[in-house]
Amino acid sequence: MKTTLFSFIFSVFFAFVFAITGCSKNDLSNPAVPEKEASELPFENDKLKMELISTSIPGGSSVNDMHFFNETTGIIITYNGKIYKTSDSGVTWSVKYENKSNNQPLLQILFLDQKAGFAVGGDEYNYPGHTAGGVILKTSDGGDTWANVFQTDGSIKCNSIAKDNNNNLYVIGNANTQKSDKIFKSNDGGITWITTEYKDFKLSKIAFTGKFGFCTGGAYPGTGKIYRSVDNGGSWNESKSFSDTDWTWDLAFKDSIGFCIGNNQSIYKTEDYGETWDLVHSGTSYKIDFLTDKSCLVWGGGGWSGGDFGHETGSFRLTTNGGKDWVDYSFKKEIGALRSSSFYAATEGYVVAGKYLIRVSVK
């Protein structure tokens, strides 16, 4: 527990630093629209509806990622290395995986279809009773059972996973030292893995669209960057350097159009497969759900209750015209930052805020 708490505080600290840096450094040509009057749950207007499903989701604020197959069945992974599954729309959950010998965080989840899926994680630091290293888990039965298919030793964790246009898998290996991050690749459904790239750059997230691949990251203090592959992950080269951003984080694509978060604060957009990026909005931002070619939700933290151990109220921003205009929302109560989400349809999904599970319907 001590290990998990320390790692969690460490991660939150750097996220907070990046957010503050973004707020102080950005000279925005498109300044942030002030957030609307704070809302309460349940919430509904002419654009979307949000219903509170549970106030005690397992893992609470330690939920790192989630995947819902449909309205009733979903998976969540947590910072303390557990995997839970629900079959009743998140009302009840059962533990499907727990690493009792090595309390390694699980960070991102990816399902290829209704049965085959992966969860990646680990920690780049050693602690008493806790061994550093990365881990990749695989399920072949929709998340009911999980097997370890890859384990890295040393000061590196498996931070993000994605699939290319040829169904090859890629995983970022994020190290605790500069100039030692890696990209692992599997071309046999996750059975075997090889190291394909070695970057002198701190990597954070990986994503693919068509034959194009993208890796975000950066360093604090430093310059946020995006690495791009134009050959299905065969080679990677720097395609964008952000002078006003120390770190790029989540990103999502639909064909040639994509959105990316910088410094947990700025939202950038590309319309040409990452050749160029433009700042389109600003506001505390952690997670992107790119739903249609016009509709995109960006989840965030909102206001801060104050003090060293305060809480974020939770906020999000929505565009329905491809990023030209955004509407910002925040919450009155301190429900916590909205960091994990999953949409099983273009207009239907779930988001986690602290210990709350919320069902979202976009109109």
Image (tube, rainbow, N blue to C red):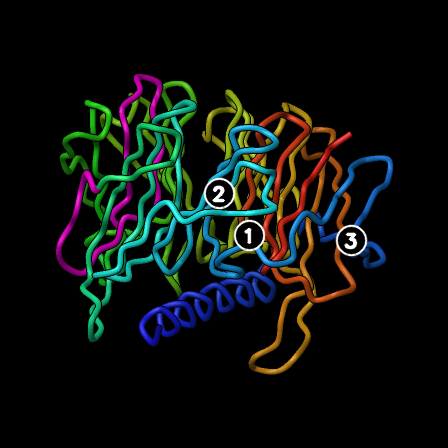
Q: Is residue 154 magenta?
A: yes
Q: Which callout, 3 or 1, points at the residue further toward the start of the chain?
A: 3
- Residue 17 against residue 199 in the figure, above or below: below
Residue name at image x 56 percent, y 79 percent:
309
The magenta stretch is 148-173
How far from the left and from the top, in percent, is residue 64? 45, 52
Q: Is residue 271 magenta?
A: no
Which SS class for mark 3?
loop
Residue name at image x 46 percent, y 46 percent:
76
- Residue 64 against residue 206 in the figure, above or below: below
- Which residue, given by chain and number where applicable, does mark 3 sit on? 41
- Toward which corner of the image does residue 101 lie, by quadrant? bottom left
User: How far apart are the two marked residues, 2 and 3, measured between alpha carbons?
Assistant: 21 Å
Residue name at image x 15 percent, y 38 percent:
195
Amino acid type of the residue tagged 3 in the rendering: Leu
Q: Which mark is residue 66?
A: 2
User: How far apart are the two marked residues, 1 and 2, measured between alpha carbons?
Assistant: 10 Å
Of the pair 71 and 154, the residue shown nearer to us: 71
Q: Quadrant of the C terminus?
A: top right
Disc 2 packing (10 Å; few <14; some 14–19; many ≥20): many
Tell me: 130 left or right of 53. left
Q: Quadrant of the N terminus?
A: bottom left
* Marks 1,2: beta carbons within 8 A: no
- Which residue, given by chain and number where applicable, does mark 1 sit on? 339
Q: How many marks?
A: 3
Disc 3 packing (10 Å; few <14; some 14–19; many ≥20): some
How far from the left and from the top, in percent, is residue 220? 39, 64
How far from the left and from the top, in percent, is residue 182? 21, 45
- Residue 12 against residue 79 in the figure, above or below: below
Q: Which mark is residue 176?
A: none
